[in-house]
Structure formats: structure tokens, C-alpha cells
Amino acid sequence: MNIAIIGAGAIGSTIARILARNGIQASIANSRGPQSLTALTNELGPHIKAVSAKEAVQADVVFVAVNWDRIPAALKDLGPWNGRILVDTNNAVEVPSFKAVNLGGRTSSEAVAELAPGARVVKAFNHLPAAVLDADPQANGGRRVLFLSGPDADAKQTVSDLIARLGFAPVDLGGVNEGRAVQFPEGPLTILNLVKFD
């Protein structure tokens, strides 16, 4: 399974770091081009390589981790997705105010899916701050919980398996509508640092 990350800010670089720590190969891209990611890839070692966004989007699983207002530009002209998995790690908020963006009743994943027709969108890796996500997933005698949601059961299973491989406890909330529970800032599960005991 090929994995790529679009976005090298706090969340994108944290996901890259977690993958590298677990010996999982992945590529990472940003809007400024692969050469701008040299310091990050040197830090993370041989498992993470810098590529263009056009190359990143060819992966089987693509994490999109950019500020909400930059998502349209980040996904522009990157199709067709042909059923590849897009992991929506974003929250529909304005930066730096963290005010919720009016999505007209849609979930953030529905808005992202409209920008990536043909992608199988899974909401995940968005409810914890980067510093908590980057911490040891083994906490207080259990595994730190990562929520996921989306309409495609097979895509969710792939992401759930990856979450478990990274040492976290995946919790499937259900479909797109259930993903509202982790939609920052209104969702009741946002920023909840929960631990699952097996």
C-alpha cells in the first residue's frame, strides 16, 4: 500500500513522523515543491521522501492536511481519483481565529469529497492537536483513540488497519453524518484525548 501526505504543516509533518517511527514508507508534498521539504525529510530519515502533489496523489492512501482555506488549491487538477482513499484530516475553521466555516449544513468531509470526485473519503486524524497526536499512542495502560468515519466500509477498514498498525485504537463512528461528532469546534468529541483499554 502506497501512502502519501499533501501538506507539511503541523498535522502533515506529524503524520509523516508517526509513519517513519513505525518504519512505514510514505511520500510528502506541499505547495512549495519537494526541494522545500529537504530539512523535514532529512529529519525523518529514509522512510519519507518528498514528491510533487501530482506524484503524491497517485498513492493508494492520500492524507490531506492543509489549512481549510487552502484545500481547494491543494486538490485542484489532481484528479481523477479513481477510487483511491483520501484521508480528510482537516477541520473547517478559519485560521488563526478558529471560527467555524459555514458549510451550509454539509460536513467537512462532504465539502472535501466535492473537491476530489472519485475519491473514497475517510475522516480521521483530525480530532487531536498535533502535539498529542505525536505523543506515544500507548498511554495510561491503554491505546490512544483515533476516530474515523465515512461512507465506504472498505476504505474505512484500510484506514482503521493503518491506525492500529501505528499503535492507536481505531474507533469507527459510522458514516459521513456521524463524522460531525469530530468536526471542530462544535463536535462533542473534538480534542478529547481518550484511551482504550483492551
Image: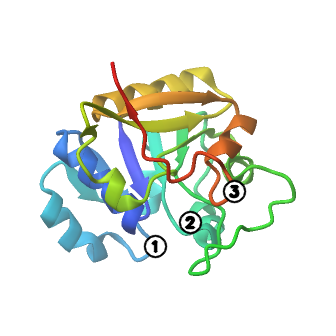
* SS category of the residue bearing label 2: helix
Which residue corresponds to mark 2?
Answer: 74
Q: Whole-percent x and y of residue 22? A: 19, 39
Q: Nearer the viewer, mark 3 or mark 2?
A: 3
Above or below, comparing residue 189 to residue 13 in the picture: above
Mark positioned earlier in the residue sequence (2 or 1): 1
Amino acid type at mark 3 = Glu
Q: Residue at x 60, y 43 (%)?
A: 81
Mark positioned earlier in the residue sequence (1 or 3): 1
Q: Nearest the camera: 180 or 116?
A: 180
Q: Whole-percent x and y of residue 195? A: 38, 35
Mark 2 in CB contact with mark 1 (< 8 angstroms):
yes
Within the image, what quadrant is residue 111 found in?
Answer: bottom right
Alpha carbon distance from label 2 to label 1: 7 Å
Q: Whole-percent x and y of residue 120? A: 62, 36
Task: Determine if residue 29 is in view.
Answer: no
Amino acid type at mark 2 = Ala
Task: Determine if residue 103 is in view.
Answer: yes
* SS category of the residue bearing label 3: loop
Q: Nearest the camera: 102 or 116?
A: 102
Q: Residue furthest right?
A: 104
Q: Residue at x 68, y 73 (%)?
A: 99
Quadrant assignment for the N terminus: top left
Q: Nearest the camera: 12 or 177?
A: 177
Q: Nearer the viewer, mark 1 or mark 3?
A: 3
Mark positioned earlier in the residue sequence (3 or 2): 2
Label at residue 186? 3
Amino acid type at mark 1 = Ser
Which residue corresponds to mark 1?
Answer: 31
Alpha carbon distance from label 1 to label 3: 29 Å
Q: Residue at x 21, y 71 (%)?
A: 38
Above or below, comparing residue 139 to residue 133 in the picture: above
